[in-house]
Amino acid sequence: MEPERLAVVIGTGTGGVLTTLGQDDLYERSGARRLSPFAVPMLMPNGPAAWVSMELGARGGARTPVSACASGAEAVAMGLDLIRAGRADVVVAGGTEACLHPFTVAAFAQMKALSTSEADPASVSRPFDADRSGFVMAEGAGIVVLERADFARARGARAYGALAGAAVTSSAHHITASDTQGQVLAIRTALASADLGPGDVDHVFAHATSTESGDLAEAEAVAEAIGRHAAVTATKSMTGHMLGASGAVAAVAAVLTLKGGVLPATRNLDRLDPAADLDVVHGESRAGVWSAGLVNSFGFGGHNVSLLFTQAQ
């Protein structure tokens, strides 16, 4: 394809935090002359998008949304905007995060966001569970290839689903606290973008980090925006919280659910919090023919992103 019609959008929440901290340790220990000449490229948040664009020869733009834990989902939403605006035929979009370091763990622990459980580590991430105590940090990446429908058909691409709509809103409320109304606005705006009604959504990939207040704020937002009929799952129960990559990974799971017909169960959900009055799938995954899935992703700073995926046509 024409390089000018191929774009890359890859978000991250922290950028090259591990290499930054490593280079700072080296500076403190050995002085400025021991720093790597690649220290700046390693710390740049736009590094992943830049490297992927060079690997693919993409000249339609290499962009990097940095919106905390909503970064990966915002990248997918931005990719849809580029295609709808006629500025690209194909967009490689998603998020990546490499953040596990004593500094970052301590920082999240100090703000009381991390789980305090001393149980088996595999059981600690417990979205919507009455005994949840915070999230579990993780690393990872998720990438989707978005294409104009006619372009995909012309090249015989295998479509997993269709990105029918997306929305990005800001709560303008609090630097870290969840805001139900900002989330409701994102969901409703995404529905309008997809030309769908609340009743059309039959499953939800919730942001659901396993924090006490965050899970309930989202449960209230989902109930208000689309109702309580949809089946809800929380992938962070299986993956932990990959910060800026989490929304993109959930998007990958959403299209696989549409393609394969299986909505994964939320792990570690032994006792649903009564305040989370939703149909949260747990125990066994739920098979069926799924038609429209909502993916939510929210970040510190009041960043709210909702994506809507439907069956490929």
Image (tube, rainbow, N blue to C red):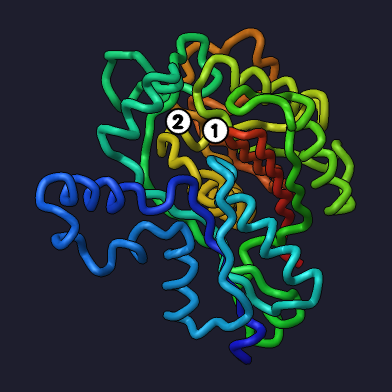
Look at mark 2 in the image and give the residue it sits on.
237
Q: Say which of 196 and 56 sits in front.
A: 56
Residue 218 x, y percent position in the rendering = 67, 25
Residue 217 x, y percent position in the rendering = 67, 20
Is label 2 in a helix, a strand or a loop?
helix
Q: Residue at x 41, y 35 (%)?
A: 240
Outermost residue, front direction? 32
Q: Answer few, some or many: residues within 10 Å of disc 1's Cα (few below 14, many 20 plus, some between 14 and 19).
A: many
Quadrant of the image occupied by residue 293? top right
- Please say whether residue 257 is visible from this viewpoint: no
Q: Say which of 269 and 249 sits in front.
A: 249
Look at mark 1 in the image and give the residue it sits on.
234
State whether residue 212 is above or below residue 193: above
Residue 246 x, y percent position in the rendering = 50, 44
The type of residue carrying mark 1 is Ala
Q: Say which of 78 and 17 sits in front.
A: 17
State whether residue 152 is above or below residue 23: below
Q: Residue at x 62, y 40 (%)?
A: 297
- Please say whether residue 269 is visible from this viewpoint: yes
Is label 1 in a helix, a strand or a loop?
loop
Q: Quadrant of the N terminus?
A: bottom right
Q: Residue at x 74, y 54 (%)?
A: 310
Quadrant of the image occupied by residue 135? top left
Quadrant of the image occupied by residue 158? bottom right
Residues under labels 2 and 1: Cα distance? 6 Å
Q: Answer few, some or many: residues within 10 Å of disc 2's Cα (few below 14, many 20 plus, some between 14 and 19).
A: many
Residue 306 x, y percent position in the rendering = 71, 44
Tell me whether the residue at label 2 lies in contact with that at label 1, contact meaning CB atoms closer than 8 angstroms.
Answer: yes
State whether residue 163 is above or below residue 1: above
Is residue 40 left or right of 80 when viewed as pictured?
left
Q: Quadrant of the C terminus?
A: bottom right
